[in-house]
Amino acid sequence: MVMVDRKKLEALLQWMFQSIGKNLEALVVVDREGLVIASLLKDGINEEIIGGMAALVEPVLKRISSEFKSGNFGTGSFDTEKNRLIFCEAGPDSILVLVANALASLDRLFPYAYLCAEKITRIFDGRSVSPVIPDFSHESKKLQGSKDISQILIDEGSFVLKTVLCGEGGVGKTTLVTQFIQSSFEEDYKSTIGVSIMKKAIKFEQWNTEVRFTIFDLAGQQQFVRVRQTYFKGAKAGFLIYDVTRKETFDKIENWYNEAKQDESDIMMILVANKIDLVNERKVTEEEGKALAEKLKIPYLETSALNKDIVDEAFKTLAFLFIRENKHMKALT
């Protein structure tokens, strides 16, 4: 049996139920033999049945994946008359099983399953994990369920993602990207002059896919507005970052959003509440951040440059949101 911090795992499963809503019937984490490690279920759902189903499906997915030399089966789905199931590999030792009603959207379940499985992997590794799951409700490409066991796949290859970091001066844009790129945190802040450009790749081994970030750290000061307009061109994604200890930086987020959308109407953005480690100095609540994200119809995340795992999660989430448009399904026969 896999050893795990059950309090963290239970908190994560609770948040998943809260995020997905009424269509979710059960969340179960099982080991490779189908033994239940943790679960959260609605009344009337039998976790032993779910564990048995996972044990039955996992060898099939693993065998097919081996034939395609993909290494891991990643994520798969299976529909019954009453339920829709998603199986998502969570590290080398466990599988996350989502059980929803038959009418639930597979498009909406897929991103939640992936990110939750990533977080479970970090819990097993003893790393820091935020239980917060962003809203993935805005999908454009639809997946159709199947009563055959199917893999959810992402097109293989390398994708380039021009990304802009937006926000007022001093909100922590530079320290966040430095933590992501160089795994270091600089306590002495130096104001960005115009723009700083950095690069890093994230690999999704389960899909043999790589996202290569080209990150433009834009200066927040007013005198750099004209410079920023140049670098918004061609950007496909971006973070809208504010400092939770400075309400004025939160109040300027919509200006940044409108500035980005003016130059790139299709840019994909995530709202980021930074410096959450400064609990006693916090001026902008989580509820206020979520309300703004809902208004702008974008995901919401909380970060701290002091915690590399949370910072990495923010960038990996952005990369995943980008490549998910290239997803498709393959029946396992």
Image (cartoon, helix red, strand yellow):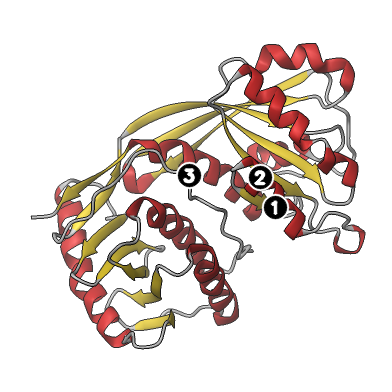
Res 264 seen here: yes
The one nearer the camera, 259 or 113, is: 259
Mark 2 closeness class: few <14, some 14–19, many ≥20 residues within 10 Å: few
Classify residue 333 as left or right of residue 273.
left
Name above or below for residue 182 compared with residue 219: below
Tag shown at residue 169: none
Residue 157 lies, with reference to residue 224, above or below; the image says below
Mark 3 Cα-neighbour bin, 10 Å: few <14, some 14–19, many ≥20: few
Q: Residue 305: percent from the left, percent from the top?
A: 75, 48
The C terminus, quarter of image = bottom left
| Disc 1 target residue | 291
At numbered mark 1, what does the secondary structure look like: helix, strand or loop? helix
Local packing at callout 1 (Cα closer than 10 Å; few below 14, some 14-19, many 20+) is: few
Give the amino acid at mark 2: Lys
Residue 45 percent coordinates (x, y): 33, 84
* Picture coordinates of residue 14, whole percent (x, y): 55, 74
C-alpha distance separating marks 3 and 1? 16 Å
Pick out the residue farthest to the left: 333
- Looking at the picture, which amino acid does disc 1 mark? Ala
Picture disc at residue 295? 2
